[in-house]
Image: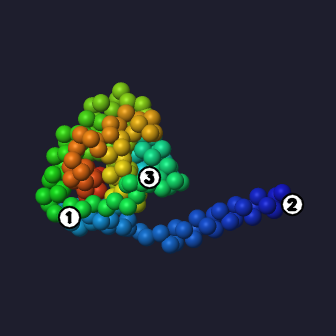
Amino acid sequence: MRKAIIVGAILAITGGLSAFSQQSPTQPPSGPWGGCCGASRWPVGPGMMGPWGLGPSMMGRGMIGSMPRHRYAMVSGIPAPYSALSNPLPRTAYTIERGAKVYEQNCTGCHGATGAGNGPAAQTLYPPPANLVWVSQLPIGQWDSFMYWAVGEGGAQFGTAMPAFKDSLSKDDIWAAVAYVQAHLPQKPAN
């Protein structure tokens, strides 16, 4: 009886995975910024996220820092007053350029120029800064409300060193940075 239950469970799991893989699109969705302002999404290919999506490649050490917020959002939702927010800025090259400047001035030190969580300050932080390459690949990374909440409130709630920017950056600067991350990450590292 026990053997039959185990075999049945294995068949159900593998059958479910097979059905999921047949339904999954081969290309990631373009997201709200896909095709705008020269932005494009990199497809997730072999080696980009390591074996089974858990390896060290592009996710690097920064995945750990972003997991508690992601898990919280998936279980409890985005907290009010952030849950209903959407980016009010126009999807233009100017918005992306403004976001690039905000990102460079406020985010590069920890998240790195390419968003991989490997900025100069990252080596001294635990948990490490979120790997925005990984976050931007997730559907939740395209949620304006999730991204604004992360930048606005910072990481104190989740035990990370990310500062809250809601009092030091204007709302439009936060939105521009969110737009930049959504539109232009991941970036290829400079050689």
Q: How many C-alpha atoms fall within 10 Å of the one at disc 3: few (<14), some, or many (≥20)?
A: few
Q: Amino acid at mark 1?
A: Arg
Earlier sequence position, callout 3 versus callout 2: 2
Q: What residue is rendered at 31% in x and 61% in y? A: 86
**SS under mark 3:** loop
Identify the coloring. rainbow
**SS under mark 1:** loop
- Marks 3/2: CA–CA distance: 46 Å
Can the viewer see residue 138 in this picture? no
Can the viewer see residue 159 in this picture? yes
Picture coordinates of residue 16 (x, y %)? Answer: 61, 67
Picture coordinates of residue 48 (x, y %)? Answer: 38, 51
In this figure, which residue is indicated by the disc labeled 2? 1
Q: What residue is rendered at 16% in x and 46% in y? A: 101
Q: What residue is rendered at 36% in x and 67% in y? A: 29
Mark 3 or mark 2: which is in front?
A: 3
**SS under mark 2:** loop
In this figure, which residue is indicated by the disc labeled 3? 79
178 sits left or right of 20 in the view: left
Q: Amino acid at mark 2?
A: Met
Earlier sequence position, callout 1 versus callout 3: 3
Q: Residue furthest right?
A: 1
Earlier sequence position, callout 2 versus callout 1: 2
Q: How many C-alpha atoms fall within 10 Å of the one at disc 2: few (<14), some, or many (≥20)?
A: few
187 sits left or right of 149 in the view: left
- Marks 2/1: CA–CA distance: 59 Å
